[in-house]
Amino acid sequence: MKEIKTISCIGAGYVGGPTMAVIALKNPNIRVNVVDINPDKIKQWNSDNMDDLPVYEPGLSDIVRQVRGKNLFFSTDIEKAIDEAEMIFISVNTPTKTYGVGKGMAADLKYVELCARQIAEVAKSDKIVVEKSTLPVRTASSIKRILSEQNKGLNYSVLSNPEFLAEGTAINDLLEADRILIGGEQNDSGKKAIEALVSIYAAWLPSERILTTNVWSSELSKLTANAFLAQRISSINAISALCEVTEADVDEVARAVGMDSRIGPKFLKSSVGFGGSCFQKDILNLVYLCRYYGLNEAADYWEQVIILNDYQKDRFAKKMVQSMFNTVSGKKIALLGWAFKKDTNDTRESAAIYVADKLMDEQAEIHVYDPKVKKARMMDDLNYLKTRTPEENEQLLTFENDPYEAVREAHAIAIITEWDEFKTLDWQKIYKLMKKPAFVFDGRNILDFKDLRKIGFEVSAIGKN
Ligand code: UDX
Ligand code: UDX
């Protein structure tokens, strides 16, 4: 395999953008092109104002500032990027299908297929094609077929290189990755392609952290890793329901359980329910795969992780209404946070959307403050559900730039996202601004509840007594 001089990545999203920025930073001799069909997104990536970057990640803007225009380039010219590169990453979105066979379960691979077709059309030299998007096991063989169809006598290798970064810590997760997984065909050209990709990551990671496997194991490992992580959250959330009706405290249970080194302390934080673009989509995909192969018991097992997560979101919204004397109609409720977790502007599958929707069903007036999410995003999230008309959503949801305005005269606050800045708000002042009795609902225990009680809040939290 020739030396890699140029890498291109199709898809400048939450995964493609940060991953390529770090690869460019650590491989100054490689040109990295990031392309996207969305011209607005590319314009934002090229903006001089770092606050305009389409992805917010701590540390990302510093890296973009260092390498953009040197060896990192953002553009909409997909064909040129394909032509120039020896290695092409596919990092386009693979949402859950909303139509046809596998609707609501299977991953929609239409964008991935489009990329493969475009590569096959444009390529004039051998290419290593890297699946960065999360894909169902055995997708590589479909990509390979599409690529080879054109019969140009070119050699294509398809690698699977799933991303394990978590939003909000993406840059650190890339720089200090626990492991990099590279799956490839177990033949000569496959092994050379694997080596080429290993050398890119070896620019900053020790070789023992770079794991190579066959393609299918790599594809399936990504789905499995996300399913295991989500399963831990659903497990502790199931226990939180039990804690609420007994004298147990879910944080104390999590701590006691997590100190068993076989279990470990991470991902045991009870919450309003997990969000994000990956967990639900990947588990649905896993369930679909199991069913496809007739493994119904295995499918049911994993599906329960999603069922429990929906139950948790629903329970939170119901608990709010019940505590507020079974009616929230016409009441102002402040939501602090809309992003699916702190330190990101991403809102995909955020529990906030679901909780707001349920409260709006009860005719509550929702006022939202989030440090990074813009109003248009919130409205899009609600309109996508199609529960109400966009005009009704506009009427019931008010976007606030200031947390104190969001809580002024509010009957209740629901803390949905664990942003650090919420911890340092003046809670005494907030209490004074609110209607009485004032309620605080929290799914993530980010505040000291004893202190809140001292200043007069009715504190009611999921997972807390
Ligand atoms: C994506 C996938 O959703 C996920 O399955 C995988 O695990 C990682 O990659 P993400 O980067 O978060 O996740 O998606 P998103 O932020 O939506 O970015 C995808 C980008 O691809 C978008 O900017 C979109 O405009 C672009 N795109 C999509 C193309 O350039 N071409 C297409 O044909 C389709
Ligand atoms: C996840 C995986 O962690 C990552 O490896 C994969 O590449 C993509 O999917 P991400 O969705 O960005 O990353 O964030 P993550 O930190 O995993 O959080 C997902 C959701 O779970 C968030 O809503 C978070 O608040 C919630 N969560 C996390 C809990 O409710 N409790 C926990 O203990 C941990």
Image (tube, rainbow, N blue to C red):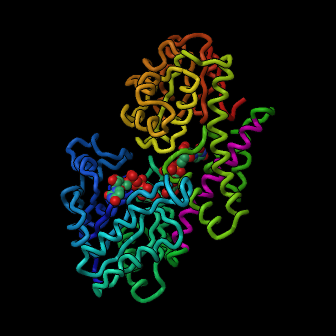
Q: Is residue 144 above or below residue 429?
A: below
Q: Quadrant of the C terminus?
A: top right
Instruction: Locate residue 103: give its quadrant.
Output: bottom right
Residue 223 counted in the magenta span: yes
Residue 383 counted in the magenta span: no
Q: Residue at x 28, y 83 (%)?
A: 2
Foreground residue, 351 or 143? 143
Q: Is residue 60 above or below residue 287?
A: above
Observer able to see residue 17: no
Q: Is residue 38 above or below residue 140?
A: above
Foreground residue, 424 or 456? 456
Q: Residue at x 51, y 44 (%)?
A: 349
Task: Provide the residue span drawn in magenta.
Answer: 217-243
Rendered location of residue 362, percent (x, y):
58, 23
Rendered location of residue 299, percent (x, y):
67, 61
Magenta segment main secondary structure: helix
Foreground residue, 53 or 59? 53
Foreground residue, 381 or 439? 381
Instruction: Locate residue 7: give its quadrant.
Output: bottom left
Rendered location of residue 295, percent (x, y):
69, 67
Q: Quadrant of the N terminus?
A: bottom left
Q: Residue at x 26, y 64 (%)?
A: 32
Instruction: Locate residue 285: give its quadrant.
Output: bottom right
Observer able to see residue 452: yes
